[in-house]
């Protein structure tokens, strides 16, 4: 295999964008809320954001940096959108990245490497109506239908621990569903509910 030609920026730094991404992928990312939001990412190893999730429904998983040095990475964002699709209908939409940022910041606050289990991301109106008919806990105008919410679980943390981490971000809604063992996170108005 031949080596890629060096560009001026590669010659100056000795690293390619791919090399930088690989180096960052191996580091621990620290995110914490500052100035009252989830978006205050600490700059220890550079301004990077990572999301780790798997789906028991589809068998898929993601573990990727989706933001690097002030920019969302288009291919990574597209993969997040596909991963968080309505698996029942096979439809996806552009997720509101503020929700993904809240998820990433809360995950880092919990100081755990285990990925989230995604129970629900985007929901089509048809899926939301079906779930609402089965359960009183599904909102008619759910933020899931706008790509602004996620229902998540981590076996290594309790619902209370997850909810406290998400609420500490002070950037959206946090619902505790202890009976079903998951936490709802969204980028809507700051509020909390459930036990």
Image (cartoon, rainbow, N blue to C red):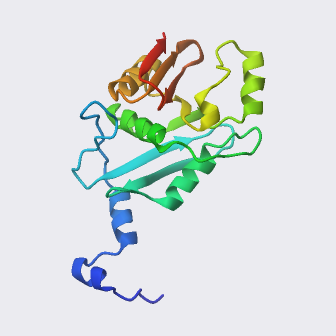
The residue closer to the viewer here, 57 or 188, is 188
Residue 42 percent location from the top left of the image: 24, 45
Q: Residue furthest top?
A: 195
Is 173 situated left or right of 69 in this image? right
Q: Is residue 115 above or below residue 175?
A: below
Residue 165 percent location from the top left of the image: 36, 26
Q: Is residue 137 above or below residue 41?
A: above
Residue plotted at (47% across, 37% down): 99
Q: Looking at the rendering, which quadrant does residue 138 occupy?
A: top right
Q: In the rendered image, is residue 191 in sight?
A: yes
Q: Looking at the rendering, which quadrant does residue 180 occupy?
A: top right
Residue plotted at (29% across, 53% down): 47
Is 99 situated left or right of 20 in this image? right
Residue plotted at (57% across, 35% down): 118
Is 38 situated left or right of 181 in this image? left
Q: How many marks?
A: 0
Residue 127 percent location from the top left of the image: 75, 31
Q: Looking at the rendering, which quadrant does residue 40 occupy?
A: top left
């Amino acid at each position: 295999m031949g080596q890629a030609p060096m560009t001026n920026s590669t010659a100056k730094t000795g690293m390619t964008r791919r090399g930088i991404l690989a180096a960052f992928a191996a580091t621990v990312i620290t995110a914490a809320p500052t100035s009252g939001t989830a978006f205050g990412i600490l700059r220890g190893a550079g301004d990077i954001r990572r999301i780790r999730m798997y789906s028991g429904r589809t068998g898929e998983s993601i573990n990727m940096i989706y933001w690097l040095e002030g920019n969302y990475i288009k291919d990574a964002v597209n993969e997040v959108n596909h991963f968080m699709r309505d698996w029942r209908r096979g439809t996806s939409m552009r997720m509101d990245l503020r929700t993904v940022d809240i998820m990433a910041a809360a995950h880092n606050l919990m100081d755990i490497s285990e990925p989230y289990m995604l129970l629900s991301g985007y929901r089509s109106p048809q899926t939301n109506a079906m779930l609402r008919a089965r359960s009183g806990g599904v909102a008619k105008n759910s933020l899931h239908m706008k790509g602004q919410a996620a229902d998540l679980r981590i076996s290594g943390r309790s619902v209370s621990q997850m909810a406290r981490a998400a609420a500490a971000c002070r950037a959206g809604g946090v619902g505790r569903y202890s009976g079903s063992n998951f936490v709802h996170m969204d980028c809507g108005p700051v509020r909390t509910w459930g036990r």
